[in-house]
Image (cartoon, grey):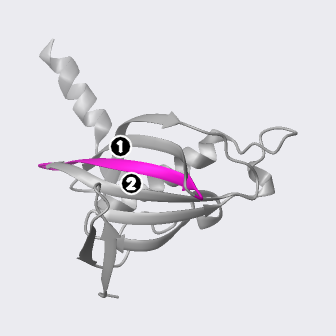
Amino acid sequence: MNDEIEVQDDLGHLISKEQTSLLTHMKVNTNFSGEVVTIASGYAKVVLDTLEVMRADEMGMVHGGFIFGAADFAAMAAVNEPNVVLASCACLFLSPVRVGDQVTFIAEEHQKEGKKRTVQVKGYVYDIKVFEGEFKTIITDRHVLRLDLLKNTEELGKID
């Protein structure tokens, strides 16, 4: 699927990007993390339809973990490398989300430094911004669960 798509930059200008296929986080449950509806180099749009099982209280507020999970998935999709992982995030939950709301997340890669990427993610219900975050990611050479982290820790202990 290599088609041209138009996306808006930060100033609202339409720019063309080549649409690509998702290469990461392929086993994510899209019921809970949203569905990638658009993906291009450094850009992803994820839509989360909130469900009754996401309810946090009697008023129908959605638990923020589901909002964060979908935003994280959008950031990973924007980087779109098989071994991308989240290193840190600074985020704001700007408005509550209710069961039944559809949240659209726009993720844009803003900085590349070696294997590090910084991705800005904004989430909207209609035109109301409900979430904003800066996700710092790292692309590892191998899957993070295949890295020998214990070996690295032991080597650090030998330095003392």
- Element at label 1: strand
Label 2, on which residue?
75
Q: Position of residue 80 (x, y in %)?
A: 31, 64
Q: Position of residue 111 (x, y in %)?
A: 19, 48
Label 1, on which residue?
135
Q: Residue at x 66, y 40 (%)?
A: 96
N-terminal of the pair, mark 2 or mark 1, is 2
- Figure quadrant of the N terminus: bottom left
Q: Amino acid at mark 1?
A: Phe
Relative side of 73 to 2, left or right:
right
| Mark drawn on residue 101 | none
The reply to whether residue 28 is in sight is no
Q: Is residue 121 or residue 65 the one in the foreground?
A: 121
- Figure quadrant of the C terminus: top left
Relative side of 116 to 58, left or right:
left
Relative side of 94 to 116, left or right:
right
- Element at label 2: helix
> Is 35 included in the stretch rendered in magenta?
no
Q: Kindly report the distance in space between the C-alpha atoms of the residues bearing marks 2 and 1.
A: 7 Å
Which segment is the magenta one? 113-126
Q: Position of residue 132 (x, y in %)?
A: 45, 42
Most extreme residue toward the top is 160
Q: Is there a contact, CB below 8 Å, between mark 2 and mark 1?
A: yes
Q: Amino acid at mark 2?
A: Ala
Q: Quadrant of residue 107?
A: bottom left
Q: Residue at x 35, y 78 (%)?
A: 21
Most extreme residue toward the right is 58
Mark 2: few/some/many CA within 10 Å (<14, 14-19, 20+): many
